[in-house]
Every structure is written in structure tokens, then in C-alpha cells.
């Protein structure tokens, strides 16, 4: 009887942990989906909405964020494609393939960059970088 009484809380804990920890495959898919949503909003210049998706720890005020996003906008993004997602613990990276117009070059130039994300409080948050 004592063994059963001791095992019951342990079994409940393990079941609860398994139920609340997303699988890596699920995290990769959710990250890809969130990154696609983020970049669609960036293309539409919906900076107030993308601001809400950012990790708050190093985020500047909204006005500064919008100004920075507008500076980045000098390169017109024609299209993007989420190429690859990687998840390690609570950190994720997304390889974003973009096609941009970089004046004075009239034809689109293809580029790849790595976007960083954090899984926090059950949600993916984009890591905003001032570059």
C-alpha cells in the first residue's frame, strides 16, 4: 500500500509533464507557422502587430521600432520563404530566404538570413535585432 501511495504522485507528475511539454516536431511546425505570420505582417508593414510578436527583453519603444523597420524597408522585399527551422530547448532559428530589390540594382537579389526566436510562456517570440 505504501509503494502505491508513493508512486501515484510520481506518475501524475510524469503524465502532467508529458502532456505540457510540446514535442520538438510540434515546436518546429509552430515556429515555421509563426515565422510565416510574422513576415507576412512585415511585408504588409503592420509594425504594430509584429511589435506584439517580439521578445520584450531588449525591445525598444514602439516609435523607435517602427522607425528602424522603416529604415530596413529601403530594401523592398519582393518575397520570402521559410526555408529551415531548428529548435534547441527554448530557442529557435529560422532560415528565411528573401528576394529583395536593392537600389540601384533593378532586379531582385536573393539573400538568406537567420531569424532568432524564443519559446516563452507557450508562445514563440521573435528576437528583434537593430541591424
Image (cartoon, rainbow, N blue to C red):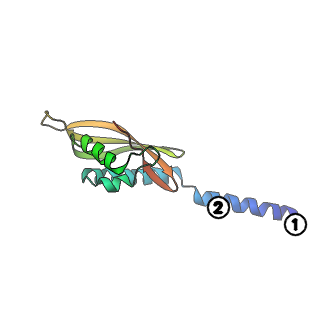
Contact between labelled residues 2 and 1, with CB atoms less than 8 Å apart:
no
Per the rendering, the mark at residue 79 is none
The residue positioned 69% from the left and 59% from the top of the image is 13
Secondary structure of the residue carrying tag 2 is: helix
Q: Can you tell which quarter of the image residue 11 is in?
A: bottom right
Label at residue 1: 1
Image quarter (top left, top right, bottom left or bottom right) of the N terminus = bottom right
Residue at horizontal 41 percent and vertical 50 percent from the top: 54
The residue labelled by disc 2 is 16
Residue 85 is drawn in which quadrant? Answer: top left
Tell me where residue 84 appears, x and y as whole percent.
Answer: 39, 43
Along the viewing direction, whichever of 17 and 64 lies nearer the viewer: 64
Residue at 33% across / 42% down in the picture? 96
> Which part of the image, by quadrant, shows the C terminus?
top left
Q: Position of residue 20 (x, y in %)?
A: 58, 59
- Comes first in the chain, label 1 or label 2: 1
In this view, the residue in front, 59 or 36, is 59
Amino acid at each position: 500500500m505504501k509503494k502505491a501511495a508513493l508512486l501515484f504522485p510520481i506518475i501524475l507528475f510524469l503524465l502532467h509533464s508529458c502532456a505540457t511539454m510540446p514535442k520538438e516536431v510540434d515546436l518546429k511546425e509552430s515556429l515555421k507557422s509563426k515565422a510565416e505570420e510574422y513576415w507576412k505582417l512585415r511585408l504588409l508593414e503592420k509594425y504594430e502587430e509584429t511589435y506584439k510578436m517580439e521578445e520584450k527583453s531588449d525591445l525598444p519603444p514602439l516609435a523607435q521600432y517602427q522607425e528602424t523597420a522603416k529604415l530596413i524597408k529601403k530594401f523592398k522585399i519582393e518575397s520570402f520563404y521559410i526555408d529551415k527551422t531548428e529548435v534547441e530547448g527554448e530557442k529557435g532559428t529560422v532560415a528565411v530566404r528573401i528576394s529583395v530589390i536593392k537600389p540601384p540594382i533593378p532586379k531582385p537579389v536573393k539573400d538568406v538570413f537567420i531569424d532568432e526566436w524564443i519559446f516563452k510562456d507557450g508562445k514563440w517570440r521573435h528576437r528583434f535585432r537593430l541591424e
